[in-house]
Amino acid sequence: MLKAFRAEPKAATDSAKIICFESVRGLAAFAVLLGHLVIAFWPALYVVHSPGQAPQYPLFVRLFACPPFRVVWEAQWAVSIFFVLSGFVLSLSFFRSGRVETLTSAAVRRYFRLMVPAAVSVLAACVLMKLGWMYNQADAARMNRGAPGSAWWLASFYNFHPSFSTALKEGVWSTFFGGGTAFGQGRPVVVLGYNPNLWSLAFELQGSFLVYCFLALFGALRNRWMIYVASILVVALTHLQPALRSMNLVNFLLGAALADGYVLAQRGRRPFQLPWWVGAAGVCLAAYVGTIRPASSLSLRWVTVDRDVVYQSAASFLLIGCVAFTPALRRVLEIKAFAFLGKVSYGLYLIHTIVLCSLGCWLHLALVGRWGFTHGVAAGVATAAVAAVSLLVAWALYAWVDLPTVRICKVVYNALFGVTRAQDRPELALPRAAAA
């Protein structure tokens, strides 16, 4: 046991994964779903940042496309929230118990926990492609006839010949280590072609191990705040190219630092808490900062970083911090609907683009081309169908893939790598003289 920590009451340590934080993850996953639906069927709205843009839409619709109201479909900020939240949740058990074994167990199981559901989604997409049930190319072609170039996002997916071998490689290896799968020759490289949402999982795996290593090395130091600052600067300045999005890894360290401060603040006689109105104001501020999306870069002497990425990281840190320290917000996020979204969040994130490109585009095509509905009505019906079916499939993934994977990984870990304590194996215990 690390002397720097003092054990919390059993009720606290047993609830290392607080429901409210899983609810935040679920709401963020739903925002990604809505964002992809908007950019698929109403792409002009996705780039609106002031009420004067896109006059073809009603004013109230344009307002919801502007900060901070666009938070309901701001997919880019939602992914930043995922990363900060992962750093927070992955660190919580360690800071509460002070046991390095919690890090070891989580690290051994992490890849399989992420890989199995991802591989299932990739193979599902491959099967749909083999059956000819991906309709996004046909739907994009129809929309581009009316407004050339408007359906560029939909047209960028599933434009290659499927293969089970490449799908298996993508699900098991390329997503996490290989940078994607290339298809064709003399054409643009298609990265993670079977499920484009998997781009974030490489960061998820790398960031998880960054947190585990950081906590194992520095988590018990008395003045570890200096190490947090130094590590964040090193990670941020190591990859300055915008394409590498180095702030994605910084977000994991921000989450770990927030979990550290949260646990320390709860150990005092009077745990630190925020009034409901302060927490709500902080969430509103985070929603505004996280959805500004400035196009300019932030230059500090010899360092240049994307301003929008910095804003989103700061907003994610503020959002999770407000939830952590505001009991009223935590109670709101623990209601059943939000808790359900939290349970199915990983599956929802994995599966919704596949449902959109198959069922959603087929339905939109049929309503517009076969039955003569307007684009707006057809897109609305398709959006509702994609959201409903995505939630249903996400629940099935949670119940039949995600949850069994977690349980099997725990059983296998305990059987193969479970820590044997000296009190359980007398022959491993040191004699008193040797211990002294």
Image (tube, rainbow, N blue to C red):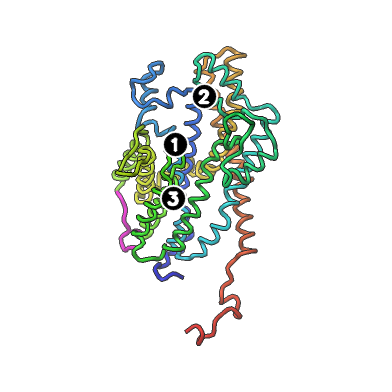
Mark 3 residue element: helix
Q: Nearer the viewer, mark 1 or mark 2?
A: 2
Q: Do the residues labelled 1 and 2 touch (CB within 8 Å)?
A: no
Label 3 amino acid? Phe
N-term mark: 1 or 2: 1
Q: Do the residues labelled 3 and 1 touch (CB within 8 Å)?
A: no
- The stretch of residues the image draws in magenta is 265-274
Disc 2/disc 3 C-alpha distance (Å):
32 Å
Q: Mark 1 points at which residue?
A: 76
- What number is the disc on residue 152? 2
Q: Residue furthest bottom?
A: 433
- What number is the disc on residue 50? none
Q: Which of marks 2 and 3 is in front?
A: 2
Q: Name the residue under label 3.
A: 252
Residue 313 position within the rendered picture, expressed as x and y whole percent measured from the top left: 38, 43
Q: Find residue 45 and report its image quarter.
A: top left
Label 2 amino acid? Trp
Disc 3/disc 1 C-alpha distance (Å):
16 Å
Say left or right for 34 vs 61. right
N-term mark: 2 or 3: 2
Residue 284 position within the rendered picture, expressed as x and y whole percent measured from the top left: 33, 38
Q: Find residue 224 and report its image quarter.
A: bottom left
Residue 155 position within the rendered picture, expressed as x and y whole percent measured from the top left: 56, 25
Taking depth in this image into account, of 114 and 330 the one nearest to the observer is: 114
Mark 1 residue element: helix
Mark 2 residue element: helix
Residue shown at the point (58%, 37%) measured from the top left:
192
Q: Would you place residue 272 above or below residue 52 in this image? A: below
